[in-house]
Image: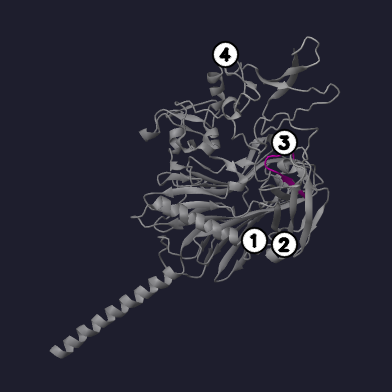
């Protein structure tokens, strides 16, 4: 009996050792699928993707993430990840958690509810689902945006996230419409996601949505900007919150999101390409903001107004795909610096998505794969003999393809696709993965005023490569430069940006690159120039210190009664050419509801009684009126 019992114990011990070894091998295999970065994904290592469709919901589950989409509206009602049953705010109705929306005629919001569900693909590797609705004049006229809608969702094996894209179409007989905004919105659990990250420098714990209520804050000059007066967390008292302070340029708007510190979970919106966004690489738009809310912006009139083309006419057919973007979730060990770990992992994932673009797993003909796209290359040089007798290399110039139009029209183009890159130090460029179609090539060069456009329509066909050779940009000028204030670089960063009023500070905008986003800097002009406006003397003044970064009206204490401001530029002009013409060139970064007037005067100063030698003190007067 003792020998039998001993063998039994040995057998149990062997079984336990075998289970431990197998479990260790299992976790090793799982870890082999994921680079070492202290990111956790529990559960089956790499299960196939499962799909369940019921009368009310569509559920897609890959073992890492479970996505629930309302049937047939296409609203995302739940995202289950790690120990969180739903990262979205369950207190909101189904239509207010994760959704697409359009803002169209008369500022009408349309959350684009769909009517039909179709399985596009269901394999072990991925599930792609389509939610559609065709616009019908008889039932939808003046009720919903006149569009045919196709919202797509893809969940892939081994990826803790969901890819989303939309295909929207207008037929020729659809009525006129103004479509001001298109976006994807996610509203996260308010009691969990408190830390927001937009860039390496703009990150921080954020107020709660309720802190923006009028019982806890004071509305400032516009409704989006509030001053925290009685926030739920006292640390935010005296801070400003404004969603526009978290904007960034399209070229940089690739990654942003939120972190739940309690769960060490991150929620991120990853945009691997800007080809479907409007307004070009420098157009600014929203990212994430207090709510907690995460946005994927595709079309908007933010920072451009209705100058951007958002008008669709009857008789004009149109079709465009927006996305895909990846809604990515990650988690970290609770004993890590989880914020840094999650942010760095999200940046790693962004790099992977960019490297994989265009995706080869999408099943729509509206998203051509790499082999069905083209490429354009060339070299851009600058010819400006007033600067250099030789051709100059257009270093770090932005070169792009956009819908055919006038010089600079890419900045207000809102319906087609755009593809941009930067030149290398020799001015060479290579624009890859261009959709088939007809384009113009546009560019602008750092340090040179104006825009370049190649006077040639470029037709891209699948698989072809267009070599444009050497292109020459001739900047506009009528003679040698007598003086210059600032740098033609489409920013005002080189000018004087004041410190914010200490009573209106947002900690996320303290970095030098984002200081211009601080609230109320326009009123700082009135504080600094109390007794007169800007007077800039060429050769004496320094534009980094003496030229205010924005030409604004003067605050007289009554917001409805702002006064005109007049700036002066004074300079000495030697050897005046009495028969020549002198040209003043202005480069405006932006203007809103303003009228700019320019006048000129001169004073002749004689150095000899005979007037044989003289020079002139010239003055330009800039007048800004509301």
For the residues labelled 3 and 2, the Cα–Cα distance comes to 30 Å
Task: Identify the residue under disc 3.
Answer: 307
Residue 404 got which mark? none
Left or right of 26 in this view: 159: right
The answer to whether the residues at label 4 and label 3 have Cβ atoms under 8 Å apart is no
Q: Nearer the viewer, mark 2 or mark 4?
A: 4
- Mark 4 Cα shell of 10 Å, populated few (<14), some (14-19), many (≥20): few
Q: Residue furthest left?
A: 2
Q: Is residue 410 magenta?
A: no
The answer to whether the residues at label 1 and label 2 have Cβ atoms under 8 Å apart is yes
The answer to whether the residues at label 2 and label 4 have Cβ atoms under 8 Å apart is no
Left or right of 21 in this view: 202: right
Q: Quadrant of the N terminus?
A: bottom left
Name the residue: 83% across, 48% down.
455
Does any portion of residue 387 appear in the rendered image? yes
For the residues labelled 4 and 3, the Cα–Cα distance comes to 36 Å
What segment carries the magenta color? 438-450
Asked which colour scheme the image uses, the reply is: one colour
For the residues labelled 2 and 4, the Cα–Cα distance comes to 60 Å
For the residues labelled 3 and 1, the Cα–Cα distance comes to 30 Å
Name the residue: 48% across, 41% down.
291
The answer to whether the residues at label 1 and label 4 have Cβ atoms under 8 Å apart is no
Does any portion of residue 170 appear in the rendered image? no
- Mark 3 Cα shell of 10 Å, populated few (<14), some (14-19), many (≥20): few
Q: Is residue 440 magenta?
A: yes
Left or right of 240 in this view: 489: right
Instruction: Return the residue nearer the eye: 613 or 417.
Output: 613
Task: Identify the residue under disc 4.
Answer: 531
Task: Identify the residue under disc 2.
Answer: 373
């Amino acid at each position: 009996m003792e020998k039998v019992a001993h063998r039994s114990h040995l057998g149990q011990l062997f079984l336990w050792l075998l289970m431990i070894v197998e479990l260790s091998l299992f976790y090793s295999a799982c870890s082999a699928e994921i680079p070492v970065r202290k990111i956790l994904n529990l559960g089956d290592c790499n299960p196939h993707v499962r799909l369940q469709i019921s009368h009310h919901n569509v559920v897609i589950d890959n073992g890492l993430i479970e996505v629930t989409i309302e049937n047939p509206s296409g609203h995302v009602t739940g995202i289950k990840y790690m120990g969180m049953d739903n990262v979205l705010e369950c207190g909101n109705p189904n239509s207010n958690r994760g959704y697409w929306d359009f803002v169209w005629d008369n500022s009408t919001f349309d959350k684009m509810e769909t009517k039909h569900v179709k399985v596009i693909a269901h394999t072990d590797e991925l599930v792609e689902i389509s939610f559609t609705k065709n616009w019908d004049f008889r039932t939808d006229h003046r009720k919903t945006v006149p569009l045919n809608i196709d919202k797509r969702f893809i969940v892939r094996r081994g990826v803790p996230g969901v890819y989303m894209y939309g295909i929207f179409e207008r037929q020729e007989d659809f009525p006129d419409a103004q479509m001001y905004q298109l976006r994807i919105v996610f509203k996260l659990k308010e009691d969990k996601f408190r830390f927001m990250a937009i860039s390496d420098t703009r990150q921080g714990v954020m107020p709660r949505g309720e802190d923006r209520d009028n019982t806890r804050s004071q509305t400032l000059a516009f409704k989006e900007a509030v001053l925290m007066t009685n926030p739920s967390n006292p640390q935010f008292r005296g801070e400003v919150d404004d969603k526009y302070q978290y904007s960034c340029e399209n070229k940089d708007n690739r990654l942003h999101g939120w972190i739940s510190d309690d769960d060490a979970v991150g929620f991120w919106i990853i945009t691997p390409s800007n080809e479907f966004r409007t307004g070009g690489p420098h157009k600014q738009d929203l990212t994430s903001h207090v709510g907690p809310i995460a946005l994927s912006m595709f079309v908007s009139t933010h920072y451009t107004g209705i100058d951007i083309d958002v008008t669709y006419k009857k008789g004009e057919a149109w079709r465009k795909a927006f996305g895909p973007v990846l809604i990515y979730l990650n988690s970290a060990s609770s004993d890590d610096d989880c914020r840094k770990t999650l942010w760095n992992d999200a940046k790693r994932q962004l790099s992977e998505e960019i490297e994989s673009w265009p995706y080869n797993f999408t099943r729509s003909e509206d998203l051509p794969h790499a082999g069905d796209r083209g490429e354009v290359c060339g070299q851009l040089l600058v010819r400006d003999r007033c600067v250099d007798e030789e051709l100059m290399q257009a270093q770090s110039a932005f070169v792009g393809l956009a819908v055919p139009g006038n010089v600079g029209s890419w900045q207000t183009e809102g319906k087609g696709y755009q593809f941009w890159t930067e030149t290398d130090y020799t001015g060479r460029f290579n624009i890859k993965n261009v959709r088939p179609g007809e384009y113009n090539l546009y560019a602008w060069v750092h340090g040179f005023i104006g825009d370049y456009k190649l006077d040639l329509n470029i037709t891209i066909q699948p698989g072809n490569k267009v070599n444009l050779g050497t292109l020459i940009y001739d900047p506009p000028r009528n003679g040698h430069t007598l003086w210059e204030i600032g740098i033609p670089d489409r920013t005002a960063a080189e000018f004087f940006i004041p410190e914010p009023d200490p009573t209106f500070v947002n900690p996320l905008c303290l970095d030098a690159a984002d200081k211009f986003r601080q609230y109320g800097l326009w009123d700082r002009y009135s504080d600094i120039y109390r007794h007169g406006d800007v007077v800039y003397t060429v050769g004496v003044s320094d534009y980094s210190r003496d030229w205010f970064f924005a030409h604004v009206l003067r605050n007289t204490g009554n917001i409805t009664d702002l006064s005109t401001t007049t700036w002066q530029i004074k300079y000495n002009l030697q050897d005046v050419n009495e028969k020549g013409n002198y040209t003043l060139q202005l480069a405006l970064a932006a203007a809103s509801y303003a009228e700019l007037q320019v006048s000129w005067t001169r004073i002749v100063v004689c150095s000899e009684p005979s007037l044989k030698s003289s020079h002139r003190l010239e003055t330009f007067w800039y007048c800004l009126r509301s």
